[in-house]
């Protein structure tokens, strides 16, 4: 049965996915590389350098390593400006209720974010103390879609992957949840996230009983 919920951060608990998009879009515009929301779906959940190489190869732009690092840093500084004014009001509706419901059922709560800025965002949202374990993006070698980050959280919580639910807004993240052997919940567009076992348009629509039923033996 389900013993842990492992949340993605950007796009699941708050709208930072939009800020990542805006910061990448500004950089792409500056480089004269076409980049829209459709392209951005492939970048959600993908780490900083992976996202940048996607954009550069879309523009058929090959740059020396040094310049690539400068661009990555530029995007990150823009992103950090965008999240500077975040507050607990930016936490998606339903998050506190869901955390409370999970705690009352003794279900562990983990975080699997690819973002190096995750600790700061958790702090701004006032939810840093809600998690039993937060994966450190800096310590995970393989980013999403590789399952390492979700498996790292399950391992730290000492809960078998098949007893975990991963919650994601990104295709890359859903892939890592599936390859980790966990149950999957998508937050967003059903058409886009069609690989998830359950999809809810928004976090506050998550039906806990329905999700927990995914862990019950099929008959
Ligand atoms: C997030 C975002 C990605 C972003 C990545 C790295 O992952 O979805 O768009 O590129 O983190 O972020 P940073 O540049 O801040 O290290 P997640 O896993 O929280 O969705
Ligand atoms: Mg995400």
Image: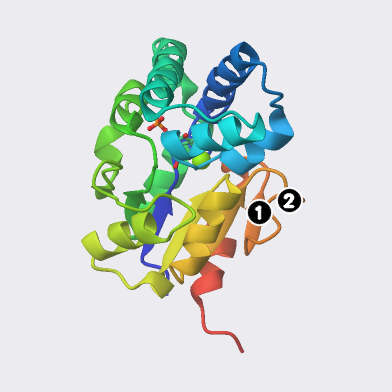
Q: Which quarter of the rendered picture does the N terminus lie within? A: bottom left
Q: Which residue does the numbered mark 1 point to in the structure image?
A: 199
Quadrant for residue 104, please give it.
bottom left
Q: Residue 55: percent from the left, percent from the top? A: 59, 31
Q: Is residue 198 left or right of residue 74?
A: right
Q: Nearer the viewer, residue 65 or 217?
A: 65
Element assignment for label 2: loop
Asked if residue 61 shows in the view, the reply is: yes
Residue at the spot of label 2: 190
Q: How is the image coloured?
A: rainbow
Q: Nearer the viewer, residue 58 or 179?
A: 58
Q: State yes or no: discs 2 and 1 in contact (Cβ < 8 Å).
A: yes
The quarter of the displayed image where residue 120 is located:
top left
In the image, taking residue 69 as reference, residue 15 lies left or right, namely right
Q: Residue at x 77, y 51 (%)?
A: 191
Judging depth in this view, the residue of 182 and 140 nearest the camera is: 140
- Please identify the quarter of the rendering in which residue 129 is found: top left
Q: Residue at x 22, y 60 (%)?
A: 156
Where residue 201 appears, as percent x and y from the top left, is: 68, 43
């Amino acid at each position: 049965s389900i013993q842990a919920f492992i949340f993605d951060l950007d796009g699941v608990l708050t709208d930072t996915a939009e800020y990542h998009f805006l910061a990448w879009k500004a950089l792409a515009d500056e480089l004269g590389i076409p980049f829209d929301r459709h392209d951005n779906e492939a970048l959600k959940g993908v780490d900083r350098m992976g996202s940048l190489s996607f954009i550069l190869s879309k523009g058929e732009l090959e740059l020396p390593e040094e310049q690539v690092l400068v661009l990555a840093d530029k995007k990150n500084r823009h992103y950090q400006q965008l999240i500077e004014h975040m507050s607990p009001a930016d936490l998606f509706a339903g998050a506190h209720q869901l955390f409370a419901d999970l705690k009352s059922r003794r279900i562990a709560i983990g975080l699997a974010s690819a973002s190096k800025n995750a600790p700061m965002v958790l702090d701004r949202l006032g939810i840093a103390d809600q998690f039993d374990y937060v994966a450190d993006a800096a310590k995970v070698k393989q980013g999403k879609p590789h399952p390492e980050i979700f498996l790292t959280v399950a391992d730290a919580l000492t809960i078998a992957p098949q007893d975990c639910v991963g919650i994601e807004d990104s295709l890359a993240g859903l892939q890592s949840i599936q390859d980790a052997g966990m149950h999957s919940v998508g937050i967003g567009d059903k058409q886009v996230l069609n690989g998830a076992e359950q999809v809810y348009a928004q976090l506050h629509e998550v039906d806990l009983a329905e999700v927990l039923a995914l862990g019950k033996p099929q008959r």
